[in-house]
Amino acid sequence: MLQWINKILEAIDNFVWGVPLIVLILFVGIFLTIRLRGLQIRKLGTALKFMVKNEEGGKGEVSSFGALCTALSATIGTGNIVGVATALVAGGPGALFWMEIAAFFGMATKYAEGLLAIKYRTIDSDGHVLGGPFYYIENGMGKQWIWLAKIFAFFGVGVGLFGIGTFTQVNGITSAANNFFDPNNAHMVNILGRPYSISVVIAGFVVACFAALVIIGGLKRIARVSEIIVPFMAVIYIAVCLIILVLNVTKIPSAIVEIVQSAFGLRAAAGGALGAIIVAMQKGIARGIFSNEAGLGSAPIAAAAAKTHEPVRQGLVSMTGTFIDTIVVCTMTGLAIVITGTWNIGLEGVAVTTKAFQMGLPFPEQVSAFILMMCLIFFAFTTILGWDYYSERCLEYLTNRNQKAVKVYRWIYILAIFIGPFMTVSAVWVIADIFNALMAIPNLIALLTLSGVIVAETKSYLKKTSA
């Protein structure tokens, strides 16, 4: 039965993440990059400065940095550790190249999303903010497009509940805990007729409990927790990856060559080059979108809550999220895996990255595995929090801000965290991919339709500030 379900899910995944959607995502990023004249290169320094310097007197619920950390809490997660490994195993080292290409153009996409989120957001008399693709579709494209906004919000709830927000994150956490505490599955317990390690059950229970404590507190508590955990764990993870790269610096050039050759099918057998390129592109771009969420439409939901008057300013801050998430963090993970060669030794998921850390770090294997486990746990935990916020906002839009529905949803979300550890790894990631694609399509349509507004706002702001 499970095999039959997995085959159906894989067929749906291959359809929605086929060539048309890959082309659409890249096209939107390239189109916006051209129309904005390479803004992600020209204004990256300004964006990084704005990232840590909050605007004074802006209206909103959290600071720009808090909104960015909430967005990063939802993006820096298992996608950076498990997702990169999954992409490399399925698509070869070349998947990392296409992940980077998607991220470069995705920075322009993320900029546009942040800008539109502020421009078209709504703020109640009590200061409650609601914004994101559903509002820039409705208010920007017109009331006749409300049906498209509703579709986005519906799939946004689905992504949070069944995709990025719960199953994949808690599955990654419990897999890491299992690899560390009970790698040989010596301590098992039967649940619904299937055997699971006690470490998986305990880790899943603990994560769900801690998530509940934060989620019940709403956005401001999520933002406060994210502002502490995200920068701290990002610095630690980057530092650990740098140790691997420095100790293996002589292997980096050959690893880069391998990545580029694999990206263009140069290592494939005669006649198989095109197929190798398509697989590398598909896996790299799909995992890249999963990791940095550019084009998905999730980050602008958090951006809309930022205390700012300037849509362009928040767009620049939002853009740094993709830079940090993929250009920095995912690149380091991918290089560590390629340098150590753990992508093609028969491992799956978090075990690939764990082995890379064990081989690349000058510490005992248990210490290396513990470091990765802790990074993964904190990254994935904050992603659970961030996606609860995203999906709650989508539900608010669908239910005309019915707070009773939101409170009920929070408990359903927490229940989904409990269920996550008992889903199979392959099924979890396929479900996440499917919901990602279905959520991305309405958002991409809106970005293309409103590209003129994006360009006009950008020109006006840059002329006014000479930024």
Image: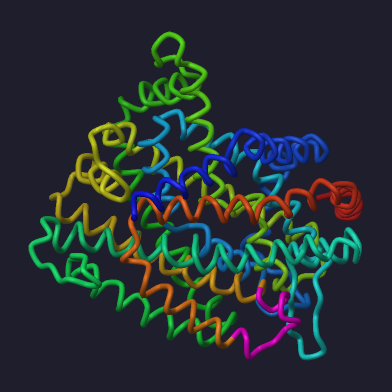
Picture residue at 67% right of the left edge, 34% below the top? 23
Q: Nearer the viewer, residue 458 or 194?
A: 194
Left or right relative to 458: residue 265: left
For the stretch drawn in magenta, what is the main secondary structure?
Answer: helix
Q: Nearer the viewer, residue 439 or 364?
A: 439
Res 39 → quadrant: top right
Q: Residue furthest top?
A: 270
In the rendered image, residue 102 lying in the magenta stretch gets the answer: no
The percent position of residue 277, horizontal first and vertical second, equals 51, 24
In the rendered image, residue 405 lying in the magenta stretch gets the answer: yes
Picture residue at 43% right of the left edge, 50% below the top? 80
The percent position of residue 144, horizontal first and vertical second, equals 90, 63
Left or right relative to 431: residue 104: right
Res 178 → quadrant: bottom left
The percent position of residue 419, horizontal first and vertical second, equals 37, 71
Left or right relative to 119: residue 232: left
Q: How is the image coloured?
A: rainbow
Picture residue at 48% right of the left edge, 37% below the top? 283
Vertical position of residue 38 compared to residue 212: above or below = above
Quarter the N terminus occupies: bottom left
Q: Nearer the viewer, residue 240 or 191?
A: 191
Q: Nearer the viewer, residue 259 or 432?
A: 432
Picture residue at 31% right of the left edge, 31% below the top? 339
Q: Is residue 68 visible?
A: yes
Q: Is residue 227 visible?
A: no
The percent position of residue 335, horizontal first and vertical second, equals 38, 36
Vertical position of residue 275 compared to residue 212: above or below = above
Vertical position of residue 383 compared to residue 334: above or below = below
Q: Which residues are magenta?
A: 395-406
Res 197 → quadrant: bottom left
